[in-house]
Amino acid sequence: MKLGMRGNSEKGVTMIELAVVMAIIGIMGLFMSPALGEWAAGFRLRGAAKDLEDTLQQARLKAISTRTPYRVQLNINSGSDTETFVLQNDPDDDPDQGWLDESTAITLPKGVNIDNIDGATGGNINRTFRTNGTAFGWAAGSATTSIFIENQRDDRYRIIVSQTGIIRMNEGW
């Protein structure tokens, strides 16, 4: 073997091989992008529903632990991008004195909206928890409240709150 010459045992990747691999990855990405968009829409919906369920649960637990009424105020404007919910407390235990926001309002992600709450499709709707963990603020005669949340692809979640304070989330309606 002469000095300065390479032996056949050296390995590497040529530019042509690298270009072929990059082209294959690009083609795969092109075909997978619609599926990724659908996955992301479902992920945003599930995340928003879980955030709302967690906020309701937090309101119940704080009402019990602090012996102060708590509620979640939902601002629904069906079909808009401005639907929000916020955790609030009533430090004086006097609804006439006003409720205080305990956190900043959470805005639902783009493409996710609250379809209705017990048939109501707009305005500010409250779901309140007493200091014993029970809930009130429902439609007359109803033992539970249902919050229906969906995305533009008609994927849906239903959050159910019983008057006993039990909160659960179901996929679909």
Image: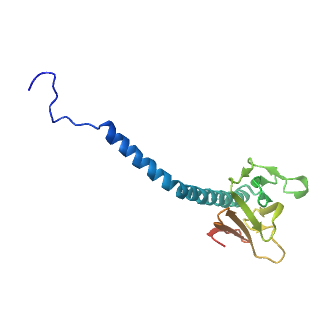
Where in the figure is residue 114, as x and y percent of width and height? 73, 62
Where in the figure is residue 38, as x and y percent of width and height? 57, 59
From this view, report whether residue 118 is shown above or below residue 75. below
Where in the figure is residue 1, as x and y percent of width and height? 8, 26
The answer to whether any part of residue 114 appears in the image is yes
Q: Residue furthest bottom?
A: 141
What colour scheme governs how the chains and residues are painted in the rendered image of this protein? Answer: rainbow
For residue 19, which quarter of the picture?
top left
From this view, report whether residue 100 is shown above or below residue 115. above
Q: Residue furthest right?
A: 96
Please tell me which residue is depicted at 68% across the width and 56% down the height of the picture: 111
Q: Residue furthest front?
A: 16
Please tell me which residue is depicted at 69% across the width and 64% down the height of the picture: 149
Q: Residue furthest top?
A: 3
- The quadrant the C terminus occupies is bottom right
- Left or right of 167? Residue 68 is right
Where in the figure is residue 36, as x and y percent of width and height? 53, 55
Pick whichever, 29 or 48, lies toward us.
29
Report the label total.
0
Please tell me which residue is depicted at 90% across the width and 53% down the height of the picture: 97
From this view, report whether residue 118 is shown above or below residue 2. below
Pick whichever, 22 or 16, lies toward us.
16
The answer to whether any part of residue 64 appears in the image is no
Please tell me which residue is depicted at 44% across the width and 52% down the height of the picture: 28
Pick whichever, 89 or 120, lies toward us.
120
For residue 132, which quarter of the picture?
bottom right
